[in-house]
Image (cartoon, helix red, strand yellow):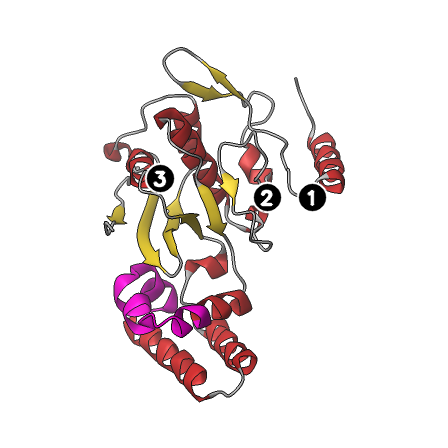
């Protein structure tokens, strides 16, 4: 079945008007005896056009139903491919569907998240300047990251009103981002002991880092690169190109067992 881009947009609009959270309606799968393969003949890379939530029963991954601000259409194509691929690999391994708990955030949402961590007693300096290499990278270096974190902690400690403290933190984050969530390049998954197996499999196809965070417990994934050709190789059960062919498949998986 062929479908034009105009027809696709119309179908998506119709789906949104009915469900608001089911676009596309499904990622079709078919069993091939020795594994699973997605039926993607109708479009080259559906995730480039994906938007909205995916917590319907027939998806291979889910979005945390208690969150209302996740729209993977705001994340990068690499992140959207990663979410879908994580679902496919989990299905192949016979483990539960990965649950996405966060995608792209604006500065206000990131400030609110940092405020919650601070309220619960998390060490923000350690998290954002030592544990999270991504945070230091997007901030433009360790000095910038430390200065931003110190300023945010000061705002939290000195403000009488939480809303005022969060607004000041958001202002600081607009100047010095401390997370790739702000650019749509990170995604969080609900903590699950089985997910490292998924990450190890995806290591062959994508470049990403993984950090286990505890407030609340989740896997934070910074997706650096997941090219369309690698996504297609995974869904078609093909061996990924070797590093000698110009693909860097290294991954830094920082796993802390409970």
User: Residue placed at 34% from the left, 75% from the top?
Assistant: 144
Q: Position of residue 35 (x, y in %)?
A: 38, 17
Q: Secondary structure at mark 3?
A: loop
Q: Position of residue 161 (x, y in %)?
A: 54, 84
In this rendering, the label closer to the viewer, 3 or 1: 1
Return the disc, 3 or 1, that comes first in the chain's sequence: 1
Residue labelled with disc 3: 206
Q: How many marks?
A: 3
Return the disc, 1 or 2, that comes first in the chain's sequence: 1
Q: CA distance from mark 3 to mark 1?
A: 30 Å
Return the residue nearer the eye: 85 or 121.
121
- Where is 25 relative to 226, above or below? above
- Where is 12 relative to 132, above or below? above
The quadrant of the image that shows the N terminus is top right
In magenta stretch: residue 119: yes
Residue labelled with disc 2: 53
Q: Are marks 3 and 1 in contact (CB under 8 Å)?
A: no
- Where is 179 relative to 59, above or below? below
In this rendering, the label closer to the viewer, 3 or 2: 2
Q: Are marks 1 and 2 in contact (CB under 8 Å)?
A: yes
Q: Secondary structure at mark 2?
A: loop
Return the disc, 3 or 2, that comes first in the chain's sequence: 2
Residue labelled with disc 1: 20
Is disc 3 surrounded by few (<14), some (14 to 19) or many (20+) residues within 10 Å?
A: many
User: Residue placed at 41% from the left, 62% from the top?
Assistant: 179
Q: Which residues are magenta?
A: 115-141
Specify whether 154 is left or right of 42: left
Q: Position of residue 223 (x, y in %)?
A: 39, 48
Q: CA distance from mark 3 to mark 2?
A: 23 Å
Q: CA distance from mark 1 to mark 2?
A: 8 Å
Q: Are marks 3 and 2 in contact (CB under 8 Å)?
A: no
């Amino acid at each position: 079945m062929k479908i034009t881009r105009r027809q696709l947009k119309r179908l998506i609009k119709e789906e949104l008007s009915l469900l608001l959270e089911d676009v596309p309606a499904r990622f079709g799968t078919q069993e091939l005896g020795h594994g699973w393969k997605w039926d993607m003949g109708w479009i080259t890379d559906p995730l480039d056009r994906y938007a909205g939530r995916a917590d319907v029963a027939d998806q291979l991954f889910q979005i945390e139903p208690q969150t209302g601000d996740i729209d993977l259409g705001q994340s990068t194509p690499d992140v959207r491919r990663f979410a879908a691929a994580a679902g496919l690999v989990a299905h192949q391994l016979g483990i539960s569907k990965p649950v996405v708990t966060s995608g792209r955030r604006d500065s206000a949402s990131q400030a609110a998240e940092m405020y919650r961590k601070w309220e619960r007693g998390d060490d923000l300096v350690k998290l954002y300047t030592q544990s999270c290499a991504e945070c230091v990278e997007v901030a433009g270096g360790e000095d910038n990251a430390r200065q931003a974190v110190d300023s945010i902690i000061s705002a939290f400690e000195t403000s009488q009103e939480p809303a005022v403290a969060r607004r000041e933190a958001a202002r600081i984050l607009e100047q010095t981002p401390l997370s790739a969530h702000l650019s749509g390049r990170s995604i969080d998954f609900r903590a699950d002991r089985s997910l490292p197996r998924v990450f190890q499999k995806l290591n062959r196809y994508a470049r990403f880092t993984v950090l286990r965070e505890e407030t609340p417990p989740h896997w934070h994934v910074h997706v650096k690169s997941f090219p369309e050709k690698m996504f297609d190789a995974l869904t078609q059960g093909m061996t990924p190109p070797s590093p000698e062919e110009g693909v860097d498949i290294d991954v830094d998986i920082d796993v802390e067992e409970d």
